[in-house]
Amino acid sequence: MIRVVLPSHLRMHANINGEILLDVDGKATQQSLLDALERRYPVLRGTIRDHATQRRRPFLRFFACQRDLSHEPMDAPLPDEVTAGSKPFLIVGAIAGG
Amino acid sequence: MTGVRVLVGTRKGAFILTADGKRKSWDVSGPHFAGWEIYHVKGSRADPNRIYASQSSSWFGQQIQRSDDGGKTWEPVDNKFAYDGVPGTHQWYDGTPHPWEFKRVWHLEPSVTDPDTVFAGVEDAALFRSNDGGKSWAELSGLRGHGSGAHWMPGAGGMCLHTILLDPVDPKRMFIAISAAGAFRTNDGGETWQPINKGLRSEHIPDPHAEVGHCVHRLAMHPSRPNVLFMQKHWDVMRSDDAGNSWHEVSGNLPTDFGFAIDVHAHEPETIYVVPIKSDSEHFPIEGKLQVWRSRSGGQDWEPLTNGLPQSNCYVNVLRDAMAVDTLDACGVYFGTTGGQVYASADAGDTWSAIVHDLPPVLSVEVQTLT
């Protein structure tokens, strides 16, 4: 199971408490992880990836294992600690705005 | 019991203000969707329990929320606004072609007769419709595709479709306005559109009388007279008596004819309201005096309404969707400010008081009259 942590606004929007545990079919990548997340919570479609481009929204970042994975290819494998569930995959809202 | 429900969209959430028909004592509910920008909240005239809200965020994009119980509970509905076909380009600020990109929903306009039908005006400018209560959206692409779209250019606030007026007599006719393209009308339910900007004069574009390119800030219409339209343009208050075929200026004795909001009295189609703003570079009232100006003659002759409004050191703005009227007798008039106040008048503007003082900057105000 992969552990996913969302920003508080998205947790409230999707009525999620705490971390999410996700089963990801096949190779675990950012793409397959987000696909699984949006299948479980359809209300999150368009909130992390733009509907039209499917690209990560510019004010969001993907962190794991103390690394910024935001600019990794979407089909790159996730770190082993993430796929093993020992470290969470963090979706983080940028500190910006008022 | 007769009463009113004021729907307020702000930079940091939605608020619902309710009162009985006296409109003296108010209950404040909110923030709903705390922390999100709520560009617009509007209830269905066909079913007052049905309310739609446009919720957006620079971080998380666009959401549409729907309530079926008058705003007590909400559910997110579809948030996918996909332009029809290849979106093409419009002009960017520097005049270069720029791809059409969806950013947010500025205005939601429920059908007059069907609570499940609702129109959405979006940035970059386009019109969408849902026939299933917001569960899916389809673009009425005849508007963008009618010919001039490639020449539209954003105003300072973005290229937004901010006004949607539905003709209550002819369901196939509607009017929309885009900043900074101008006003448009359809007579066939949104299949085809024509610009209706004849008579507008805008000095900030190369041809001041151009067919498109005018920065229209807001349109207003009294439901009993859908051929008569009022417009707050960037500069100038305008009037049309032929459904937009031609316009003439009715700024008259206004102290400045720049502004954003304009609305019409619920029972007097010749009584209109504006909030004069000093200029396009100074978005606040003249001399720090917040004043609504009322014309009882359909424009040209205006009177200031100041009783209960701050007359010193007030430097707020009143945005284009932040004024509304109820249909009680006497007509109630409401507006919200970027300083977070929502002012109400239960006597058609003669006297005012603040329902709330300290909300986040107010983006929109709508009113439902409950009977």
Image: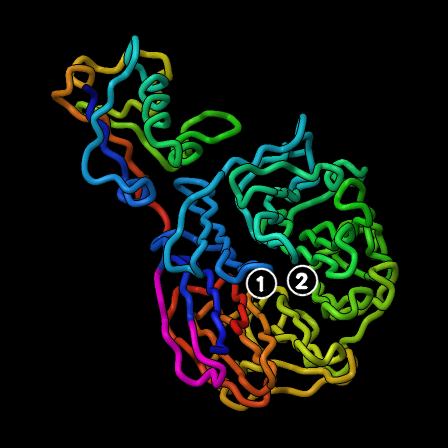
Three-letter residue code for mark 1:
Asp
User: Residue B87 location, x and y as percent?
Assistant: 66, 30
Quarter where residue B334 is shown? bottom right
Residue B310, numbered circle: none
**Number of numbered tags placed on the structure image:** 2
Colour mode of the rendering: rainbow
User: Residue B131 location, x and y as percent?
Assistant: 61, 42
Q: Is residue B204 magenta?
A: no
Q: Is residue B30 magenta?
A: yes
SS for dot 2: strand
The crowd level at tag 2 (other Cα within 10 Å; few <14, some 14-19, many 20+) is many
- Chain under disc 1: B
Q: Residue at x 53, y 68 (%)?
A: B368
User: Residue B108 location, x and y as percent?
Assistant: 57, 53
Q: Residue at x 35, y 46 (%)?
A: A96
The boundaries of the magenta stretch are B18-31
Compare residues A3 and B52 and report the one nearer the observer: B52
Per the model, the C-alpha gap separating discs 2 and 1 is 8 Å
Q: Residue at x 58, y 82 (%)?
A: B291
The crowd level at tag 1 (other Cα within 10 Å; few <14, some 14-19, many 20+) is many
Q: Is residue B257 visible?
A: yes
- Chain under disc 2: B
The residue under label 1 is B321
Quarter where residue B333 is shown? bottom right
Q: Pick whichever of labels 2 and 1 is earlier in the sequence.
A: 2
Compare residues A62 and A20 and report the one nearer the observer: A20
The residue under label 2 is B218
In the rendered view, tell whether residue B17 sits above or below residue B190. Answer: below
Q: Is residue B156 visible?
A: no
